[in-house]
Amino acid sequence: MAGSVVLQLDPNDANPRNSEGAFISLRSGDTPRIMFAYTRFTGGSGDDGTADIAAVYSDDGGRTWTEPEIIIPNQGTIN
C-alpha cells in the first residue's frame, strides 16, 4: 500500500475544495481506527470561503473509508 492513493476526496458543486488535513490513529477495540480530518469548503474555493471541518474514518488500515461527516460546522462567514 505504500505509495498508493487510498482516499480521494473530489470536489463538487456543493463542495468546491478540500484542503489542510491530518490523520490520527484512534483506539477502537482491537483494531486501530484511522480518522482523517480536513477543511471542506462550501462557500467557494478561495482561501476566505466558508468551510466546515469534516472527517472520514477507516477501520481496516486505510483500505476503505466512510462517507465524509461534518465534525465542526462553519462558525462564521469566512474560513
Image (cartoon, grey):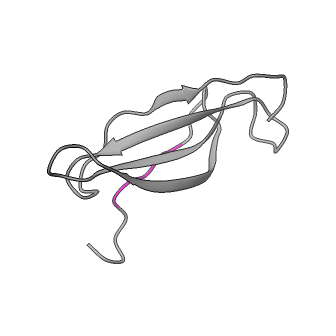
23 horizontally vs 39: left or right: left
Would you say the magenta stretch is mainly helix, strand or loop? loop
Image-quadrant location for residue 66: top left
14 above or below 79? above
63 horizontally vs 45: left or right: left
Quarter of the figure with the N terminus: bottom left
Image-quadrant location for residue 61: bottom left
Please check the rendered image and state whether residue 47 is part of the magenta-colored stretch, yes or no. no
4 horizontally vs 68: left or right: left
Q: Position of residue 8 (x, y in %)?
A: 43, 52
Q: Position of residue 53 (x, y in %)?
A: 60, 35
At x 54% / y 55%, what residue is drawn?
A: 22
- Report the residue that reaches farthest toward the bottom: 3
Quarter of the figure with the C terminus: top right
Q: Position of residue 70 (x, y in %)?
A: 52, 27
Q: Of residues 79 and 25, which is closer to you in this image? A: 25
Q: Of residues 9 and 59, which is closer to you in this image? A: 59
78 above or below 61? above
At x 60% / y 32%, what residue is drawn?
A: 15
19 horizontally vs 23: left or right: right
Q: Which residues are magenta?
A: 6-10
Disc count in the image? 0
